[in-house]
Structure formats: C-alpha cells, structure tokens
Amino acid sequence: MRASRWGRYSGWVKVAMGILSLGVAVALVALLPWGIAGANSVRAQAKSLPPAGAGGSPGRPAGPPASGGEGYDALGRGAGGRSGHGIEPGSELTPEGPFTPNRMGSIPILEFHRLGARMGRWQLTSAAFAQVIDDLYRHGFRPVNFVDVVTGHISLGRGYAPVVLTFDDGDPSQFSWAPGQPGRPDPQCAVGILWQFHEQHPDWALKASFYVNAHPFGQDSAAKVRWLVAHGFEVGDHTLHHVFLNRVDAKQAEAEIGGVAAWVQTVAPGYHVQTLAYPFGAFDRQLADSHVWSGVVDGQPYHIIGALLVGSGPAASPYSPQFHPYFVPRIQVVDPTLVSPPERAWTWAAWEQRLLANPRLLYVSAGRDISSFDNGRTNPGRGRFNVPVHPYRNPSLN
C-alpha cells in the first residue's frame, strides 16, 4: 500500500520538476539580452573616460572656482559628495589591489615639507618626490585625506592600502602656478606632480592634506586654497604664526588655531577646516582636552576633530582602541643618509620595507567600506597615546 502510494506521488513530483526546469530555461533566454547590454554598458563607460591629459574627468572642475569656492561639503568634497576624482574607488572599473582586507591594520601618514634643487634634511627634489608617489602606487597604496581617516570615510577599492600625504608650512614649492599661467599648477611643484600623476593614473585620486600658516604658498594664497579644496585636497591648520602650542595659554592657542580656520573658511566659503598639524610637533596634553578645539574667531565657528604629530610610525586604524584623534603619528620622508643612524629606523624608507615585508600590518580596504562615526564629527578611538615621538632637532626648519 505504501509503495503504491509513493509511486503515484513520485510521478507528480517528476511532472512538477519538469515544468520548473522549463520555466527556468525560458527566463534565462529572456534575460540574456539584458546581460549582454549590461556588459556593453560597462565597456562603453570605460571607453568614454577621457584620455590622460584631457580635461573633464568626472567630478573634477577644469580650474579654480570662479566665485570663491562654493560647493564643497564639510569633508571638502565637491558637488555630489564625491571624495575623490577620476575613477570612483571600488567601482567595476577598478581592479582589486594586492593586499588582503584588514580593517584593523595601521595607516602610514607621510610628512613632507619642501621641494628643491637638491636633497636636504627637510627637502626633496621634485624627481625624488615623484618617485615616492610612483612607488606607493606600484605597491598598492592609494591616497586619502587625513580627515577621511579621522572620520572613518576611507573609500578605496578592495585590496588597496590607504596612505595620507601631508605637507606642512604652505611653502611655495608645494604649490605654485606655472610661469605665466595663473590657475595652472607648476609641473615641478608638489601639487603639479600629483596632478600629472593623476592624469596618467586616474585611480590615484587627487588627495593630500596641506597644513598652512598665514599667507601660504607665497602669492595668490586665497586663490590657491580655493583651487585645492575645489579639486579634492584637504586644507588644514598649522596655526597662524607657527607657534609652540605647549608654550601658549588657551586664549592664544584659540586665536592661533581659530585664526587659520577662520581665514580658510572665509576665502573658501562652505569649506571647513577640521584637522591640525602641531607646529614643531609640540603639544600639551591638557591643551588637547581644553576648549581650544572648538570656538569662534572673526565670526567664523571652527571645530578641530584630529591633530597630527611629527613622528614616528604608522597610525593605528580609526577602528582601533589605540587610535587617539588628537595624537596621530606621522612618518618623515627623508633621504636616510641625511639623518643619524638611530633616526633612520623611523624614516619612510625603513617603514616602507617593514610594511611591504609584513602586509598584515596594513589597513587594507574591503572595497567601498565607508563608515562614519557620529555623523562624521568624532571617531571611536579611545586609546591612550603610546607611540614614541621623535621631535625635530632644528625647530626653525619646521
């Protein structure tokens, strides 16, 4: 009895499975043209990207804003909220990077000062700087701004490691106009080198953080600041007069920090200075907990959410309890032969070898893994500052 009943049921099951198979086959045939069209669309997007050197890359203005720099959000991103330029990180046009994703790894934040005709303790040649960028690119690093690290907005393709390029003091060698061409970066200055590299490698975003004092970059300071923020770079605070913040009271510190923030926000309306680099690497732990990080100067409110030291190793992941937003270490980029043997271990030349030999130490993106902490105002880091600091031996050169 049971066998006979199962025989009748199994016949119905076979009929149902046949009908289901036929339906799946019909659906696949119907969807085939849509799949082909989608693939053709991706290929068409790739072909439509402008060639290297051509203007009009997606989301990138052709030059400095004409009316004072309107149109950036609080993170310095242009219209549409894009945080970079060229090919969007993590898109189908971006191949995977060489590293294994690791959200808890460390992030190298590199420190630059001047470019010049010869190598020096605080100076690179233009060729040496260009080589640093090329090496970073080939090894799988991609740039983000420091504020992106503090807020956790790290948007990169899967398998790429973030690196932050920072420039102190607003030296003209960092940003100057091409001779006789106001509004176009000189190809020998740092901004010009980054611009040319981006044109050749669109997946290297226009990202770097410039920490300025009063009257940065020589002439046309306001126009150059507007140009930087309009093109995706970060402009940060280095105090008005490059003061030792551990030697001033809270009132003077507020005037020095808020003075830069107010000026930048005045010349680039809509942009907000959010991070600072300590002049001389000097800081006061009590100052870091005081009210000077937020205030109003010259009618302009400001709010500093992160600050950079001078030395001496990679920064902890913003997701790590060891990350402290007001004590974030940097790595000096210098010719190792120009520093004492004990200092060489703390230069980028040494750290680059260590990190590439042990890539598990690196923060590596899982692909469009953007997160924000408290609406981008703060971060989860609650750790104590425990990274050794190696201050400048000659503060007058910093």
Image: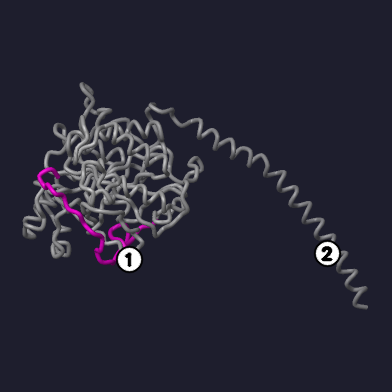
Quarter of the image with the C terminus is top left
**Nearest the eye: 180 or 267:** 180
Amino acid type of the residue that numbered disc 1 sits on in the rendered structure = Pro
**Quadrant assignment for the N terminus:** bottom right
Which element carries disc 1, helix, strand or loop?
Answer: loop
* Residue 189 screen position, x and y as percent: 24, 32
Is residue 184 at least partly visible in the picture?
A: no
Which is closer to the viewer, label 1 or label 2? 1
Within the magenta stretch, is there residue 386? yes
- In this picture, is 266 found above or below 278? above
Q: Helix, strand, or loop for circle 2?
A: helix
How crowded is the residue under tag 1: few (<14 C-alpha within 10 Å), some, or many (20+)?
A: some
Count of numbered circles on the image: 2
Residue 321's disc number: 1
Estimate the x, y position of residue 310 in percent, counting from the top left. Answer: 21, 51
Q: Nearer the viewer, residue 323 or 36?
A: 323
The answer to whether 6 is drawn above or below residue 264 in the figure is below
Name the residue: 24% across, 41% down: 337
Taking the image as shown, residue 13 lies to the left or right of residue 30, namely right
Q: Is residue 51 magenta?
A: no
Q: Residue furthest front?
A: 341
Magenta stretch, overall SS: loop
Comes first in the chain, label 1 or label 2: 2
